[in-house]
């Protein structure tokens, strides 16, 4: 190859290289797991509901979130809290409760879901809970509110509101125990209208699923209600089709929890599932039943909940990202002997729920605002240096405590010289030196004057002595 051709080749290579690097970087970015709004992007389908939330209940890790803090109507999701408050007052499910005529009549004309309870009908607390969760019976909710409110359903609802506040709910208010909308209210500011958010409903759902009675009852698809003094045998069926093995929406392993539908709430569902040691809670709200799939109308809340659960168990897992030997970085050490820095490592194993396709090398470290840039010697292995968090493409993965990996002893001689240097350069030291100099000068001047005075005094005495000699 001639020199001219070689030069042309080199120039072309230099021109092409930057573009090839850029192309590689772009390709690498495309290979990253997609994220959105601080969560994973689950490539939501076209039937996605207006509000959706997917959370790992073991760690409270938010996997997916869409409008989770938007205030909306809870519809019959309200009944979860009705059951929780009632169960807090009575743990004997065989307690016999008499349905009041007032409670039954309060639902007349609403056209809402009921279990057909009658005034004076006697049934067990357990059967009323099945009525509450399976057919989502509003009359059962009203009966429970009156019974456990000592005849005052409003007092019971007040306890419901106090309960959700104790859970940490910030935007939830109940006006009744069944979840029906106040059709005379346009928004959600009125105390006569139920309101909540998906974030609050997660806190409620997590607490409810820890109750064995609710977990069992809400996960039952069908239940036979024995005859009572006012009714023949009734058959109760769950409005949650994820529990029905013959349903289009069936999801094997689904646990509970509750459906809900009103004009303001749209179609809603909270469901849960546990597999391989992980538990996820999926919440879909503000859906509809107008989506057409396979030539039939489908409920988007049911579809979305099932989709999120499938996505979670297929793409997310609990991982040990790093152990206590993993070097995160280093921090400068002041007065260090033999080393002017110390490596920092996690205090213990870093375990987090993350997408299966990423690892700690894909993440960045964000140090807390008060994280030190320098520490003073001596440093001992295991000393806490500060806090930080692992972040993947805008998603917070784990909070970590960072500690010193090794000991760093103190160089006392260097520390002393540094102290002296700092002292000598300080304004206070300069002022003191000036004062000392001034004092010394004043002392010298005073001493000089005293000497001159003594000398003059001595000369005067000598003169007097001379005059006395002359007198003799």
Image (cartoon, grey):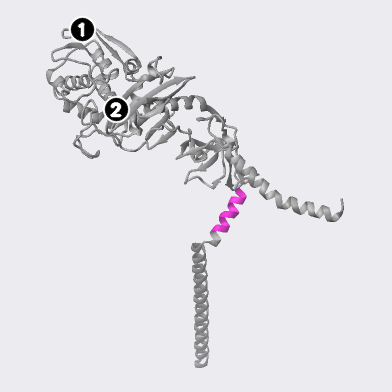
Q: Is residue 77 above or below residue 471?
A: above
Q: Residue at x 40, y 14 (%)?
A: 246
- The percent position of residue 30, horizontal first and vertical second, equals 58, 39
Residues drawn in magenta: 412-422
Q: Residue furthest bottom?
A: 470
Q: Residue at x 59, y 34 (%)?
A: 326
Q: Which of 176 and 391 is in front in this view?
A: 176
Q: Which residue lies furthest to the front in this view?
A: 295
Q: Residue furthest right?
A: 2
The answer to whether residue 93 is left or right of residue 283 is left
- The percent position of residue 221, horizontal first and vertical second, equals 34, 14
Q: Could you say which quadrant of the image residue 243 lies in?
A: top left
Q: How crowded is mark 2: few (under 14 residues within 10 Å), some or many (20 or more)?
A: many
- The percent position of residue 90, horizontal first and vertical second, equals 23, 17
Q: Can you see residue 81?
A: yes
The residue singled out by tag 1 in the image is 232
Precedes in sequence: disc 2 or disc 1: 1
The answer to whether residue 133 is left or right of residue 150 is right
Q: Can you see residue 92?
A: no
Q: Which residue is drawn at 66% across and 49% down?
A: 19
Q: Which of 435 and 442 is in front in this view?
A: 435
- The residues bearing labels 2 and 1 have C-alpha atoms spaced at a distance of 28 Å
At mark 2, the secondary structure is strand
At mark 1, the secondary structure is loop
- The percent position of residue 428, horizontal first and vertical second, equals 49, 62
In reply to whether residue 418 is colored magenta, the answer given is yes
Q: Nearer the viewer, residue 464 or 1?
A: 1
Kindly identify which numbered label has been placed on residue 261: 2
Report the label total: 2
In reply to whether residue 53 is colored magenta, the answer given is no
């Amino acid at each position: 190859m001639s020199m001219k051709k070689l030069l042309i080749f080199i120039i072309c290579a230099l021109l092409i290289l930057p573009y090839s690097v850029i192309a590689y970087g772009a390709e690498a970015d495309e290979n990253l797991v997609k994220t959105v709004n601080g969560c994973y992007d689950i490539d939501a389908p076209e039937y996605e509901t207006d509000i959706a939330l997917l959370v790992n209940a073991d760690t409270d890790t938010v996997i997916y979130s869409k409008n989770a803090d938007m205030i909306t109507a809870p519809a019959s999701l309200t009944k979860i809290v009705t059951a929780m408050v009632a169960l807090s007052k009575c743990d004997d499910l065989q307690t016999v409760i008499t349905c009041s005529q007032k409670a039954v009549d309060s639902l007349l004309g609403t056209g809402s879901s009921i279990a057909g309870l009658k005034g004076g009908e006697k049934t067990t607390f357990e059967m009323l809970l099945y009525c509450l969760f399976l057919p989502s019976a509003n009359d059962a909710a009203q009966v429970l509110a009156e019974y456990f409110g000592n005849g005052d359903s409003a007092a019971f609802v007040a306890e419901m509101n106090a309960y959700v506040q104790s859970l940490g709910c910030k935007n939830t208010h109940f006006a009744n125990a069944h979840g029906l909308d106040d059709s005379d209210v346009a928004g959600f500011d009125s105390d006569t209208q139920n309101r909540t958010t998906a974030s609050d409903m997660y806190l409620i759902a997590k607490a409810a699923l820890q109750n064995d009675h609710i977990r069992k009852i809400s996960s039952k698809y069908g239940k036979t209600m024995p005859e009572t003094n006012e009714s023949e045998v009734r058959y109760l069926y769950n409005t949650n089709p994820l529990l029905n093995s013959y349903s289009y929406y069936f999801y094997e392993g689904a646990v509970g929890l509750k459906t809900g539908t009103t004009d303001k709430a749209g179609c809603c569902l909270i469901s849960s599932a546990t597999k391989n040691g992980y538990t996820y809670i999926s919440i879909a709200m503000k859906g509809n039943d107008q989506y057409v799939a396979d030539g039939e109308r489908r409920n988007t809340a049911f579809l979305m909940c099932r989709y999120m659960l499938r996505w979670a168990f297929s793409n997310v897992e609990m991982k040990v990202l790093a152990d206590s030997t993993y070097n995160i970085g280093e921090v400068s050490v002041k007065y260090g002997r033999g080393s002017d820095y110390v490596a920092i490592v996690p205090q213990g194993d870093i375990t987090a729920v993350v997408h299966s396709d990423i690892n700690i090398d894909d993440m960045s470290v964000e140090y807390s605002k008060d994280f030190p840039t320098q520490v003073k010697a001596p440093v001992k292995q295991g000393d806490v240096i500060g806090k930080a968090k692992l972040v993947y493409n805008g998603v917070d993965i784990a909070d970590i405590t960072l500690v010193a990996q090794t000991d760093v002893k103190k160089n006392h001689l260097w520390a002393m010289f540094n102290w002296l240097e700092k002292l000598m350069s300080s304004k206070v030291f300069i002022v003191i030196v000036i004062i000392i100099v001034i004092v010394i000068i004043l002392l010298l001047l005073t001493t000089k004057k005293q000497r001159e005075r003594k000398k003059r005094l001595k000369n005067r005495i000598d003169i007097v002595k001379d005059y006395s000699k002359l007198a003799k």
